[in-house]
Amino acid sequence: MNAIEVKNLKKSFGSFQAVKGVDIIAQQGEILSLLGPNGAGKSTTISMLSGLIAPSDGDAFIMGYSVTDQPKSAKEKLGVVPQDIALYPDLSARENLLFWGKMYDLRGSDLKQRVDEVLEMIGLTERQKDRVGKFSGGMKRRVNIAAALMHKPDVVIMDEPTVGIDPQSRRHILDNVKELNRQGMTVLYTTHYMEEAAELSDHIAIMDQGKIIAFGTHDELIKMVGEQTRIDLTFNAEVEAIIPAWKEIEGVSGIDASDGKVTALVDDSNQALPRLLEVAAQGGVRILSVDIKEPNLESVFLHLTGRALRD
Amino acid sequence: MKIMEIAIKDLTRSFRSLFAVGMTIVAPLLLIGLIFLAFGGAFNGASDLPAISVGIYNADILTDTSILVEPLGANIRSMFVDESVQSWITATDFSSEMSLRSALDRREIGVAILIPVDFSERFLAGNRDTQVLILSDHTLTIAPQVAQNMVTAMLDGVSGGGIAIETILERQKIQGVQPGPEQITSLIDRYSAWYRDFQRDLFHNPESAALMMVAPTGETSSENPIQQMLGLMMAGQMVFFAFFTGAYSMMSILEENEEGTLARMFTLPMSRTTILTGKFLAVFLMLVVQGIVLLIAAHFIFNIQWGDPKMIVLALLGQVVAAAGLGVLLISFVKTSRQAGPVMGGVLTALGMLGGLFTANMNMPEAFNRLAAFTPQGWVVRGWKIVLSGQPASDLLLPLLVMLVIGVVMFVIGAFRFQRRFA
Ligand SMILES: Nc1ncnc2c1ncn2[C@@H]1O[C@H](COP(=O)(O)OP(=O)(O)OP(=O)(O)O)[C@@H](O)[C@H]1O
Ligand SMILES: [Mg+2]
């Protein structure tokens, strides 16, 4: 049985289709990343998986239970870490966890023990009596995760759990995710940081504009870019106006620019680079740096959409 | 079980919030406390009350810029000449200090009250050196003390009024209402009118006035008119803040919606109806706790005799149901917690005024009382009046029934709207 199975899931808000028929399968015990830029429809997909909003069409199954027909059973198997911190700022970390534990039917010494465990895991045992409102962003994020783990769910869905926090808390959270996975939890991890997806995942689903545009292991996805090379360029001025001319160049399959930074995906850097620079000179901008790199998930996204996967 | 835990969590949060505790419990007690202190002077004093012959020379006049309508001196004078005290005080006006003093020397009067020229202005400016001079025949002991008490009570009332008005303005500010200068003037006018009436009631009837003078502070006596008046005012305040509490507790659902905790609850294996029920239960519990705390506190602090315990329970039940109903209904029309403050302040203050919560201790015109019957608050305070005055339980039946019916109907509509909105 698959831990998560999403079948042709769709969601429309009025006439706007936010999710346009998504299929995802996560096997038990794996980490699956859902990678996509802002507005791709990641949170909307997760909201449907967690029973927060009803799908317009299609269905999803958590440990075999349909989220539309057997929502209670599906939810029992599931822990959801919402994208925005959802805690009571005027209650302490411990009180928050106690409350969410009770909501999962934990009682008495089981509850206390579990609270101690998760506090230990997120490294906040010492601060457990402090009100969450006084915590730093990173600490709040960690409690936000802990609250979803109280009932030891089979499946954890995390929606961008590392957005906007310091590197130390991020490291802590990524390590927690790996640890949870080692304990046997299936994790669906949503992010728009490709490094996180690359580090954590057994499988990666790339989502854009409401659709899954690629699915596979990290290496499988990189292979999609083929023999192509990625060139990063920096210029002394805005280059938006030059993009159309660059796209005309033979052997350039994707290009993205913002401010003075440009990322180009090319078949052969020896051939393409001089042409790129020539066109830039005609456009009146001066080159500051050139960097030729191995393709990464960023390149895959660029290859597939012609756009960058950006923060 | 989960319903109860959600409700307890809400209560915990409310009691952690200084604002919530302030508005549900401290504010009503504080307001009554101020009035209690302001008139506390009237409790102390003489042990019996012979007829008193008083002479008054009132030189107090107002400057052009004064905020007062009448000089304080005139207020003091009118206390002694009012028809309500005529049976035990004979007051005579004198046209100069000299004639007043010589009348005292000739023993034509027992007590001479001398109000200096600029008394109002200096008193309002906080200058306590300027005093109303009370001279007396040295063979008399009680009469000058009574006169002294009356003057002190009056002046304390004026000072207390200043504080009371400041408190009202503070409260309006919290509710987002910026009172204009004309509003402040009308507040002062209203307060002084009310205070004048209060003074009349206080001395209306020599028997109860005497009783009041005799009774040391704190002694239990439900017939004590001050206690009765305080009881009515306390009931009015309690009802006002109960309705505020009903709406304020319900507001937590908007906050939870904004904080994301409501959404998080919706991802848990329980029905949305359970969650909403927990939130509603919190409103009821909060109201019960508030009502009990206020009833007990008012009894012990202000010596208010609420009456028959069974009647109290019934009136409290009506209050809780009506306030919860209106709170749920009101908030169901509000989109965000930011909107909720002004809406609550506006609607509840307006309904409170119409319901006669701020005039619970006064005899209002019949038309006003009829108007009050259109507000839930009006019915709740009517219930408390019945309880306070010791009327039979059967009198409470109609108001209680009305409270319960309005409360339940409002609650059902509000709950239905929330169910539609969130579940
Ligand atoms: N309740 C809603 N009503 C209308 N449109 C919505 C609603 N929720 C989401 N959308 C739209 O659906 C699209 C997808 O949003 P979603 O939040 O799922 O993206 P996301 O991939 O999670 O992005 P991010 O990385 O910014 O969190 C966006 O264009 C968003 O504006
Ligand atoms: Mg999102």
Image: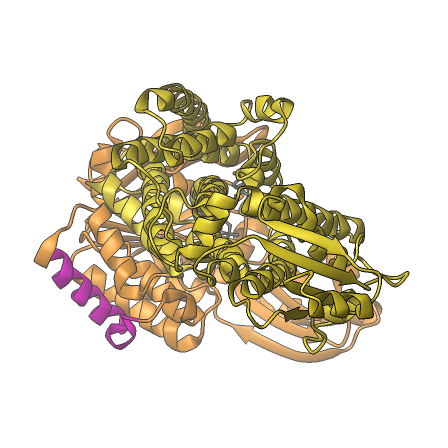
Chain colours: A orange, B yellow
Q: Position of residue A5 (x, y in %)?
A: 28, 38
Residue B218 or residue B398, whichever sits in front:
B218
Q: Is residue B386 visible?
A: yes
Q: Is residue B272 visible?
A: no
Where does the magenta region start and end? A110-129
Residue appearing at x 47%, y 44% in the figure:
B207
Residue appearing at x 36%, y 67% in the figure:
A131
- Position of B156 compared to A58: left or right? right
Q: Residue furthest bottom?
A: A288
Q: Residue furthest right?
A: B64
Instruction: Specify whether residue B211 is painted magenta.
Output: no
Q: How many marks?
A: 0
- Position of B75 compared to A66: left or right? right
Residue B157 or residue B30, whichever sits in front:
B157
Q: Is residue A95 above or below residue A293?
A: above
For residue B257, which quarter of the picture?
top left
Q: Position of residue B216 (x, y in %)?
A: 39, 59
For residue B160, which quarter of the picture?
bottom right
Residue B163 or residue A26, whichever sits in front:
B163
For residue A135, which quarter of the picture?
bottom left
- Position of B94 compared to B15: left or right? right
**The C terminus of chain A - image quarter:** bottom right
Q: Is residue A213 above or below residue B374?
A: below
Residue appearing at x 56%, y 50% in the figure:
A305
Residue A201 or residue B370, whichever sits in front:
B370
Residue appearing at x 18%, y 63% in the figure:
A182
Q: Position of residue A4 (x, y in %)?
A: 27, 42
**The N terminus of chain A - image quarter:** top left
Q: Is residue B173 above or below residue A73?
A: below
